[in-house]
Image: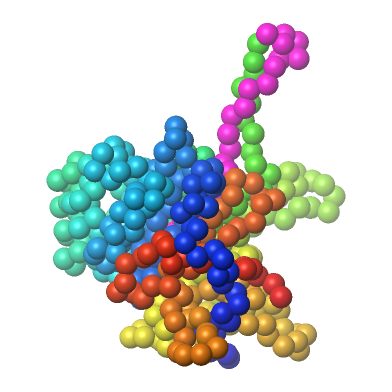
Amino acid sequence: MAEPAWELPESLLRPESAGTFAAQCRAAPDSLLYFLVNVGDGDTQLLLLPERGGRRRAIVVDVATTRKLGALLESLATAELLPPLAAAARLFALVVGTHPHADHIGGMPEFLRRFGGQVDEYWEPGYRHPSGAFVETMVALEDAGILHTQPTSGTTRTIDGVRLTVLTPGIGLRNRFDTYGVEINDSSISLKLEYPATRVVERPDAADPANLNRLPVQSADPWALVLGADAQTTAWAQAAVDFPQLHPRADGGAFSEAADAHDLMRAHVLKVSHHASKHGINLELVERMAPLVALISSVGGGGKYGFPHALATEALREAAQPTTSRGTARLPDYQLGIHYTAGLEKHEVGEPSPLGSVALMVPPRRGAPLRLWRFCDRPQDVVDLALGREMTRLRGP
């Protein structure tokens, strides 16, 4: 099994894109912006929703560390991609603490103390944990009076044109948290985001053109992002039961129409669960999701926990480029759409430099391309938007 391809050729990042990230985002107010922040072995994720009424709101999924997310939010406000933070009422439509491990909510108490008055709703799985980070998060929620929800699979919200569906934990796992026991990672809230979501349009009534009919319109194939948190094989097995993969019948029978609908486990973008540990994903799951882009948040060289694991990276590679039965040479990870927050940029002269945090610009239609940016930060650095550069390609030779 090959080691993760940490180093990318310098030619993959457009030099002319340096310093243009904020301007490019302002020019695309209807795009969904997704940030996977480089915090080492941990998760901090931020989504800027499409503009509504001339301003964006945000969704936060996990806050691993203190200060780094706050500094990024300040930079986004300075760049006029968010309203001024101090005066931004209802800025955070949703905040999610996927599960109580400190590498996911270690910075959540600080975040909630600072922004709690601007948070509409908080989701967590209901797994009680005796850690300081979990207890302090619960206290901060109560102090701020934030709506507090413990969702299970199938829970859905549509916010500013983006539909969120909870994939895990299933209700069968949720009901075992305090009885037979569930491994804490399998309590994780994993999310699917679809953009653009179903919307309502007005059309003249054919019989009476003066009247307008309001009709729901479903995008035939919306962009789909799956944020896997730390869900492991037990949680994903339950998700496969909760969201069955339907197949059309050859005779055009009763299940054909349902099977034509998009698969709720499908993911154009996959934030790989549990930092690509050996328990986070398997080949069958990745083949079903079939991501164009797979993002892994971890430190380079294995770190304390040995993430990412070869079993996970090989599953991602084999799903993107089947070679076991064909004997073809394996393409580099970046050509398979696999990207690491711990990635490095090779240079003709000198040592490689960090690629760091990832941002994806998700357009409001499938015909337009996904755009991926890197910000060259290490886990202890703040994200400098001016250092962002766009990749020349996401997948393929």
**Residue at x-position 60% and y-position 74%:** 12
Q: Is residue 232 above or below residue 140?
A: below
**Residue at x-position 63% and y-position 54%:** 263
Please tell me which residue lies in front, 352 or 36.
352
Q: Position of residue 97 (x, y in %)?
A: 32, 57
Q: Position of residue 377 (x, y in %)?
A: 38, 72
Q: Is residue 208 above or below residue 52?
A: above
The image quarter containing residue 235 is bottom left
| Horizontal side, residue 252 vs residue 28: left or right | right
Quadrant of the image containing the C terminus: bottom right
| Horizontal side, residue 338 vs residue 22: left or right | right
Please tell me which residue lies in front, 175 or 366.
366
Q: Visible in this render: residue 304?
A: yes
| Horizontal side, residue 387 vs residue 253: left or right | left
Q: Which residues are magenta?
A: 188-210
Residue 190 in magenta stretch: yes
Q: Visible in this render: residue 240?
A: no
Q: Position of residue 220 (x, y in %)?
A: 68, 44
Colour mapping: rainbow
Quadrant of the image containing the N terminus: bottom right
Residue 40 in magenta stretch: no
Outermost residue, right side: 251
Q: Position of residue 335 (x, y in %)?
A: 64, 76
**Residue at x-position 73% and y-position 44%:** 257
Count how many numbered circles sit on residues in the image: 0
Please tell me which residue lies in front, 228 or 27.
27
Q: Is residue 194 above or below residue 307?
A: above
Please tell me which residue lies in front, 258 or 176.
258
**Residue at x-position 85% and y-position 50%:** 251
